[in-house]
Image (spheres, rainbow, N blue to C red):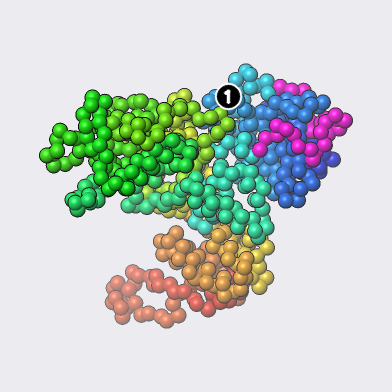
Amino acid sequence: MLTEGLISEAALQRVLAEADSPQVRNWVLAVLAAIRERFPRCDFYVLNHSNQSEDEPRIYIGIGVRRPDTASGRNALILVAKNNTAYLGFQRKGQFDEKYRGHVFTERLSAEHHTDLAEVKRWLEQLDQALDTDDRRALQGEARTVDDYLSSDSAMPLAAAVADAPSASTVQPSLNQILFGPPGTGKTYATIDHALAILDPGFMIANKGDDEGARERLKTRFDQLAKEGRVRFVTFHQSFSYEDFVEGLRAGCDDEGQLEYRVEPGVLKRLCVDAERGASAENDPFDKAFERLKDRLESTGERIVAQTVRGRRFAFEYVGGETFRIFPEESQEQKFPYRAALGDIRRLYRTGDKSSMHNASYVQGILQYLRDECGLPEYVAELPAERERPKYVLIIDEINRGNVSRIFGELITLIEESKRAGRKEHLEVTLPYSKERFSVPDNVYLIGTMNTADRSLAGLDIALRRRFVFREMPPRPDLLKDVLVQGLNIGQLLEKMNQRIEVLLDRDHALGHAYFMSLKDDSSLARLELIFRNQILPLLQEYFFEDWQRIGWVLNDQNASANGTSPFIRRPQSELNLADLFGSGVAEKLTDQRWELNHQAFSSLASYQNIVG
């Protein structure tokens, strides 16, 4: 019996009461067996089981060391089952960040995306090789099973809450991930779930479900986080550049109408600055002092006079973005003013580092003015212990549509997990325009989406590929299994077409389920006709480069006559005399290559039934 030595059938029924999917049940058992094979002495125990809650049914199985007469244990792995899915994650506290982040096993495995047991075993093998002696003890118990705890009089009941029970947030998501798959598989749609799993995992777990209001609740929370600036969204395209993403020069006019260029931060740099602060402008002392300075400039309408550390007087004004203009008192006839960068002032305040700083003496002068006149306190290097820097997410849609080497530039190195600010191997670079020292904080998460059918995929930089975790999002015909159009099963229709496409092309050019999701609300034949005319057929034309014969094979048109139905694509009804068109000498070398759409088939249920076969 598969459950022998792992968990009894009775306990399994209690523990996986909500996971009525046979696939999830079998996956959980197979994973437990693989763990027992790799770590034969580890204990299996239920950490928390909300059996009484219909709103949030989930279970946690701890894998580690725990005595039956205690309520807490030393967890090494955690297996979570909820809403007919399950995942396995590494769950060590303390030194986990420094010692293990960057290893492949820090990413959780899911029943949805890691059905191959060999992949689970490789994951466990890599974990086994990376564990140090201390953390290896967390997998050296007495080979207890879930039953040892359920049957213990002193053990907590399943529905009881454990004080130190882990939450979904303890299974750390990757800092960089890309959702990839064919068009129409819901990659952009899924970014909301992935972002919430990072920013608010508790809310995500509590509200994830198949009910009608679940998606609305998740989207509302996502929009709220976006308004707070915790989520940013950008779409890459052929014209998107480093200047848009990191920083660049932007043309503008000064007060006298003269053309000038300012250094403006890009999408990622602005996000990193906010994430590095870890606080909004209302709480950051530098930003509060800077706001007072701007109010003073606006109220007087005049330049402010300050002095350098050597006592040289100068006037300055803020012109927006990152730029201050400097007017030295001893050089009043100078035609063009000097420049000082807001980022340099902030960096000097926090680090005292003046290296690679443009016009450092004036930067120091403005910083001193902020201290003397705007209430800027001395910098406190550490945030209070009770405050944790919030996480930030940048969603990059169509990441492979841009020239990623040019867009990321030197940040290809900085986004690597081990090179992030706050890590032992962290790196900084000097940005080319502002000359600021810059690094990417470790509370910035990047989520990209990538269309595998897009032919610009080949241009994706290999350096970027190895710094991202790739999560495949294949078509899900099972989501359409209950969608019927006059008795025609749409899930079977999609599955059959994709099987033919995989044979004729590859799995990267399959059709996504999203094209057919509107049939859940309107399952009419007219809606199905619109989907095929406006979306499916044009996509097949692109896939097969107008090879109408192969398109017909995908639609099973070659068997339409035998099944007594009309094909979607057919030879023209009107015949041509090729000799009259080209002459007999050429005509005998030609074959009529004309094809045309059979409009009658698009409104015929029998033609769609023929696709299924």
Residue farthest to the left, as pictured: 333
Is 350 rendered above or below residue 517? above
Image spot of residue 463 (x, y percent): 40, 36
Q: Is residue 160 magenta?
A: yes
Residue at position x 62%, y 35% in the image: 170
Report the amino acid beneath label 1: Gln
Where's residue 381, x and y in %?
Answer: 45, 27
Circle 1: element type: loop
Q: Is residue 230 visible?
A: yes
Quarter holding the N terminus is top right
Does residue 547 appear anywhere in the picture? no
User: Residue 428: within the magenta?
Assistant: no
Horizontal side, residue 263 vs residue 384: left or right? left
Q: Identify the residue at the far top of this view.
A: 133
Magenta residues span: 139-167
Q: Where residue 274 sits in the image (x, y, percent)?
A: 44, 40
Question: x, y percentage for residue 443?
Answer: 49, 36
Which secondary structure is most common in the magenta stretch?
loop
Q: Which image quadrant is residue 245 in?
A: top left
Kindly identify the residue that appears in the image at 49 percent across and 45 percent down: 230
Q: Which residue is mark 1?
A: 95
Residue 438 lies left or right of residue 166; in this view the side is left
